[in-house]
Amino acid sequence: MAKQFVFRLETLLKLRKQREDRQKRVVAERLRQITRTQDEIRGLEWQIVGQVSAMRDEAAQPRLDAQNLAKNRHWLSRLHRSRLEADAHLRLLEARLAQERAVLAQAARDKKVMEKLKERQRERYLQGLDRQEMIAADDLTITRFLFNRAVDEAATT
């Protein structure tokens, strides 16, 4: 019985698969962070809209409170500043995501190279087994032919 095919670089292939899986998790986490930041931006936008609406309603009142108006303007400017900070954070996350996706693509290529190498070596191994089986079958056929010929010659003499 022939030996099983053994890929000598199996450990390296496993490491490459682990590296790719780890990088997939990194990219997924970065996507979650981007989604959270986008949700935060949407929330800030709604707060800004609500604050502007509240300030308009207050401005429509016949009597204005200067202290309350200043407080509302300060809060609105704080919301705008938070929105700008969130936008900057989002751009940073997207830049990191692009880098991490490039690393993921490289990890996937490295793994694919190892998988192709394994498959080629396995094919070569199977072809070698087929060749050995063919040689053994040819030897058996030749031996049988020679034996039958010797038996025929012995019977004719």
Image: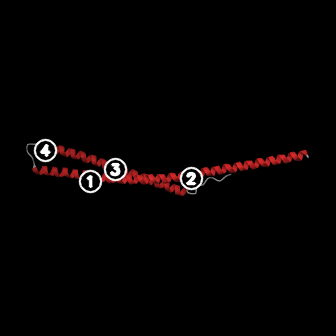
Asked if the residue under mark 3 is in contact with the one under mark 4, i.e. CB atoms within 8 Å, the reply is: no
First reached walking from the N terminus: tag 4 or tag 3:
3
Q: Give the side of residue 143 with respect to residue 72, left or right.
A: right
From the viewer's perspective, is the residue at label 4 or at label 3 nearer?
Answer: 3
Q: Tell me which residue sits at (70%, 49%) in the image.
A: 133
First reached walking from the N terminus: tag 2 or tag 4:
4
From the viewer's perspective, is the residue at label 2 or at label 3 nearer?
Answer: 2
Measured as percent of width and height from the top left, residue 102 is found at: 41, 53
Residue wearing tag 3: 34
First reached walking from the N terminus: tag 1 or tag 2:
1
Which of 40/135 is in front? Answer: 135
Which of 85/53 is in front? Answer: 85
Mark 4 and mark 3: Cα distance apart in space? 36 Å
Residue wearing tag 4: 58
Marking on residue 118: 2
Residue wearing tag 1: 85
Asked if the residue under mark 2 is in contact with the one under mark 1, i.e. CB atoms within 8 Å, the reply is: no
10 Å crowding of disc 2: few (<14), some (14-19), many (20+): some
**Kind of residue sitting beneath label 2:** Lys
**Kind of residue sitting beneath label 3:** Ile
Measured as percent of width and height from the top left, residue 35 is found at: 34, 48
> Element under label 3?
helix
Mark 2 and mark 3: Cα distance apart in space? 38 Å
Asked if the residue under mark 4 is in contact with the one under mark 1, i.e. CB atoms within 8 Å, the reply is: no
> Element under label 4?
helix
Name above or below for residue 47 compared with residue 11.
above
**Kind of residue sitting beneath label 1:** Glu
